[in-house]
Image (cartoon, rainbow, N blue to C red):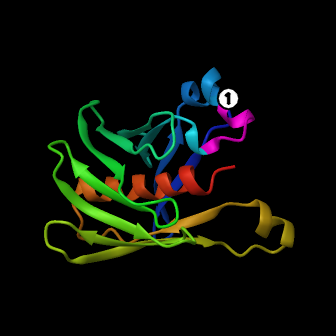
Amino acid sequence: MNYRGKMYRLYAGEDAVGTVEEKSESTTQVGNQLLKFLGLHTMVGVELIVEDQRGDLLGTIQKGKGINKGFSLYDEKGQHIGAIAFTGKMSAPAFTLVDHDDTALMKAEGDFSVSDFSVVDCESGKKLPSIKKRSFTYDTMKDNLMKEDGYFMECAGLDELRVFGMIAMSVLVDVNYHSN
């Protein structure tokens, strides 16, 4: 692959369990390139492929062009299984995962730093594990400034749609608040 799109690695502890990678068509699309050139990174549309460690398709995540666009979630067969919608403000971001029937499943609320999100199950009101963005520590200052950060969440005990939603919420935070 010769394109430079977004790519995320998924780990369970120290074991690689999958990837989330931007499709080349999303990266090379002229409208997206123009938006990036103009510095409007949060307005870029993206389509991401979610695969397991063997490279088998688990689903796709799509974001249309525009400010505060949510994500649509599709399973491996291309069936719409849910969406993540913005429900907060730029200064206090919040996202809600809904299923294909628009039933709210969980809500993530962040603070001004957009690094920590508390997550609540909408059906039970129970607090779920949070999503946290953290920087890794590298040997050199240059590496600390240039290399990637990580998003951390605990997904044990969650159903497939909620796990997929947590992954998509982490990507949404990165795309809308930490892209450059």
Q: In the rendered image, which quarter is residue 167 located in?
A: bottom left
* Image coordinates for residue 38, horizontal then vertical, percent: 73, 35
Identity of the residue drawn at 25% across and 35% down: 80
* Image coordinates for residue 179, horizontal then vertical, percent: 64, 51
Identity of the residue drawn at 79% across and 66% down: 145
Closest to the observer, 142 or 176:
176
Question: 6 left or right of 82?
Answer: right
Identity of the residue drawn at 26% across and 31% down: 77
Q: Is residue 136 visible?
A: yes
Name the magenta segment's main secondary structure: helix
Magenta region includes residue 40 = yes
The residue range painted magenta reads 34-41
Task: Name the residue type under label 1.
Answer: Gln
Q: Which residue is mark 1?
A: 33
In the rendered image, the vertical position of residue 168 relative to residue 150, given as above or below = above
Closest to the observer, 123 or 168:
123
Q: In the rendered image, which quarter is residue 69 located in?
A: top left
* Image coordinates for residue 143, horizontal then vertical, percent: 80, 65
Magenta region includes residue 13 = no
Q: Is residue 1 visible?
A: no
